[in-house]
Image (cartoon, rainbow, N blue to C red):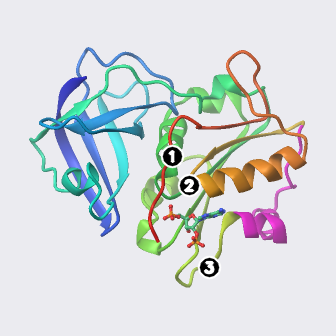
Amino acid sequence: MNLETVLDVEHYSDALFSFKTTRGPDIRSFKAGQFTMIGMADDDILRAYSIASAPNEAHLEFLSIKVPGGPLTERLKDIQVGDQIEVGDRPTGTLVLDNLKPGKRLWCVATGTGLAPFLSIIRDRHTFERFEQVIVTHTVRATQELAYADLLSSLPIIYYPTVTREPFQTPGRITERIDSGALWSDLDLSPWSIVEDRVMICGSPEFNKDLRSRLEGLGFTHGTNRAPGEFVQERAFVMQRAG
Ligand code: A2P
């Protein structure tokens, strides 16, 4: 673990915030989509956090929920610029493009803080060398949790936000919009095909399971480094928000 200095903190709601830290020379190189451990400087409690910054950026960036009474986030949410936090120096994880077979369209399907690894992926120019089209969907409870909407709207990707607990132009869970066909008609794109489409999934355990079963129903297989497939999800840790 390394001590890194907090460079910036942004709060989106009483449940969501992001922060940037320095990136010391000991943080080894990582692949877009990987995660590392985070903790308070004076505490042993560590949690896995996907890195939201690109592999070639000089700083590190993370997205976090605030869990009321949570052993780490109850303190982490109060960090200020200039504070020091512990950051693991060995990022790892399987939510990486290398675990996918070549394809035409890359779908990054996120709920909540599951957006973080996809921010790294779309900030990495290599992604656009591998795929002709990149689509990022982000489903959140409330509009103010649509973090990074400005960035996502400014990149050469298709950004498709959905909101489940407030009125919104594209309401409901992404799974519902897939099942109803609304996703494809809104974007004027054909439904997923095993030939062209590759899918990365990151969100709550229930969401991961629900999306995975839909993909497996289409014949998609989960990719690994040894045997790349048509979809990947991060199985090393869970992101669970109460309520
Ligand atoms: P919902 O409001 O219907 O629970 P969370 O903040 O709990 O991590 O959830 C983030 C978003 O993911 C919410 O909009 C939530 O919708 C949605 N969600 C939760 N479970 C699923 C699921 N199984 N499939 C699709 N979306 C889900």
Q: CA distance from mark 1 to mark 2?
A: 7 Å
Q: Depth-wise, is mark 2 or mark 3 nearer the camera?
A: 2
| Residue that lies at the very extreme toward the bottom in this rendered image | 167
**Mark with earlier residue (3, 1):** 3
Looking at numbered disc 2 in the image, what kind of residue is underneath it? Ser
Looking at this view, is 155 or 19 the one in front? 19
Q: Main secondary structure of the magenta part?
A: helix
Name the quadrant containing residue 118: top right
Residue 9 position in % (x across, y down):
23, 52
Up-down relation of residue 240 to residue 50 (above or below):
below
Looking at numbered disc 3 in the image, what kind of residue is underneath it? Gln
Up-down relation of residue 63 to residue 128 (above or below):
below
Residue 216 position in % (x across, y down):
84, 44
Residue at the spot of label 1:
238
Name the residue rendered at 79%, 71% in the picture: 182
Residue 63 position in % (x across, y down):
37, 49
Residue at the spot of label 3:
169
**Secondary structure under the numbered disc 2 in the rendered image:** loop
